[in-house]
Amino acid sequence: MYMKFSIRILIGLTGLLSLLSSCKKYLDVTPDNVATIDYAFRNRNETENYLYTCYSTLQNLNIGVGDAAFTSSGELFFPSTLTEPTLGSRDAEQGFHLIRGTQTTDRPALNYWNGEQLGQPIFKAIRRCNIFLENINKPKDLPQFERNRWIAEVKFLKAYYHFYLLRMYGPIPLIKENLAIDANTEQVRVKRDPVDAGFDYIVSLLDEAAVDLPTTIEDPAQSLGRITKVIALAVKAEVLTTQASPFFNGNTDYAAFKNPDGELLFPQTYSAEKWNKAMQACKVAVEAAEANNFALYKFIAPGNLPALPGRLKTVMDIKQSITENWEQNPEVIWALNSTFGYQSMAMPRLTAAMVQNLGGAPGNFAVPIVMAELFYSKNGVPINEDRTFDYRGRYSIEAAGDADQYYLKKDYQTIKMHMGREPRFYADLAFDGSNYFGNGQTTPENLLYVQARGGTSIAGPKDNIRVNVSGYWPQKLVKYHSVFAAEVTQSAFRMPLIRLAGLYLMYAETMNEVNGPGTEVYKYIDKVRERAGIPGVQASWAGFSSNPGKANSKEGLRQIIQQERRIELCFEGRAGWDLRRWKIMQQVMSNPLQGWSIQEASAEGYYRQRTMAIPVFGLKDYLWPIKYDDLIVNPNLVQNPYW
């Protein structure tokens, strides 16, 4: 279904490889050989190849080891003591190790500024977009309606590439057009533009693009993955919400952050109007999505599955909202054509064929205990607020009973914290004693289950690389069709970049910031909560919380919405950006990352907390550093604060 678009990208990229390679120039803002560019735009076919080359960097920004938000949010922990690299190379692990304080200015990890160290060369991608826009009028056989659409797509790409850099680095040079091929040294030494100028430019490009983009993709077999108007509107909502958020809106930590000429790079005055603009953009995006039949996903069991009990059906509603095929998932507004390639890292260790599934699934993506505690109780409130939840006794051992049927293996010895939790807890996490729907077994009464105890002692001669160091796996990232046994069969899926649930919660967030709690705010939070199988916000807090008035104040509801987003969008590469824009990453990273004593075989020995790492996150870590060498080459650049 997705093959043709992806192949055309590769064809375009291969055909233009020599065109796009050149001697290294600062930020790649000068064009390549003019004669070769003329050839690339000589007709419609060659121009279309160049269009797909503009897309090529986007396709490489898929969620995975090169994604800053996915690897460095604290949601996942990757061990640093494995005897072999299980992600393909040691370099591929570097993003996960940033929470240990490994970032440097000599060799920055995930360097998207110049494309080194797993980063994509985004400034080069912007240069390609500029070349396209400068030459799109050359082909004579290109119909105007198609020309307009291609221009809109490339304007979107140019906006998104700038946005990607801005989230990581703050103020960036805005490459509105390429410099002349004979540009002198001073012209090439560009400076950083203030962050508000960056946001404004990105929004202007998105507005221009939206006019000529198709509302939906009518030929998904050929073009799924290309940009639509709904995608552009949703990204605009995200851009403006980011600009309105505390990190970018009156952040006094950056009061001294200026260009060499004294130009202030971060606004120092809070602007409520930014939230209002974000709210209006979210409203437009939500209305456009719903008008075009986007809806929260509900699992429809295929004919080869038995009827699922209500609880298990809710779990699949949640889990498949991520892993369902894109063209069959009405919730996915935007994803990339590239598939998620790390299911084996998220696959839990099951009984019934333990040795076989270890062969294809190291399961090294470990979820810290603090993330397991983030999920709500079955009553839809935090477990430390639920008056009916034994929070103090949450680590005591108890046998699973009928109350958690389909979630836990009956009579299995586990801890009370694993009982009486919301359905997303069981859909997103796998842990000692939890049932697992999938891996070839989908009969509700006879599901496989996780046995995490014993750690490496069961895994055989390569036990060091086949271990989950916390005892929690992000099973949300494994499609239930995938099988890890004597023969491994992985069923591919595309990780959403934007889905409707996230857009609903963003809309609720902006409405709360503008007007405080109200019927419309609760409405959009409750849409997500209803699908998650928990009561609405007001009912949950009034009925079960030790702080029943929390949902009635702007500050309290802000905390609720933030936790709701962290739960609903966990492991999707969203929290890394959210925690930064909310300016609470330091708070979240202030506690040790802990797991269970995985090598112990008994329940009493296993359920003892041990520290995996103490996160290192200071003010400087909100933004990525620019490589020191780049500052030497261009004295007009200033380093990000505190580096």
Image (cartoon, rainbow, N blue to C red):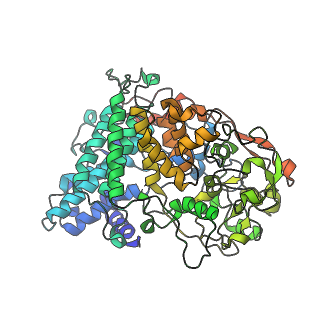
The picture places residue 186, in percent across and down from the top left corner, at 27, 32
Confirm whether residue 191 shows in the render.
Answer: no
Quarter of the N terminus within the rendering: bottom left
Q: Quadrant of residue 609?
A: top right
Q: Residue furthest left?
A: 140
Numbered-mark total: 0
Considering depth in this image, is 495 or 281 the residue closer to the camera? 281
Q: In front here: 522 or 482? A: 522
Identify the residue at the far bottom of this view: 304
Judging depth in this view, the residue of 109 and 605 nearest the camera is 605
Residue at the (67%, 58%) spot, across then down: 363
Q: In the displayed structure, would residue 545 be above or below residue 411?
A: above
Q: Position of residue 191 (x, y in %)?
A: 32, 32
> Does the rendering let one see residue 76?
yes
Relative to 128, does residue 395 appear above or below in the rendering? above
Taking the image as shown, residue 164 lies to the left or right of residue 387, namely: left
Residue 65: x percent and y percent? 55, 52
Q: Where on the picture, by quarter, is residue 48?
A: bottom left
Residue 451 vs residue 216: left or right?
A: right
**Point 33% across, 67% down: residue:** 223
Q: Is residue 57 shown left or right of residue 449?
A: left
- From the viewer's side, name the closer residue of 151 and 31: 151
Q: Position of residue 574 (x, y in %)?
A: 50, 47
Does 295 appear above or below 205?
Answer: below
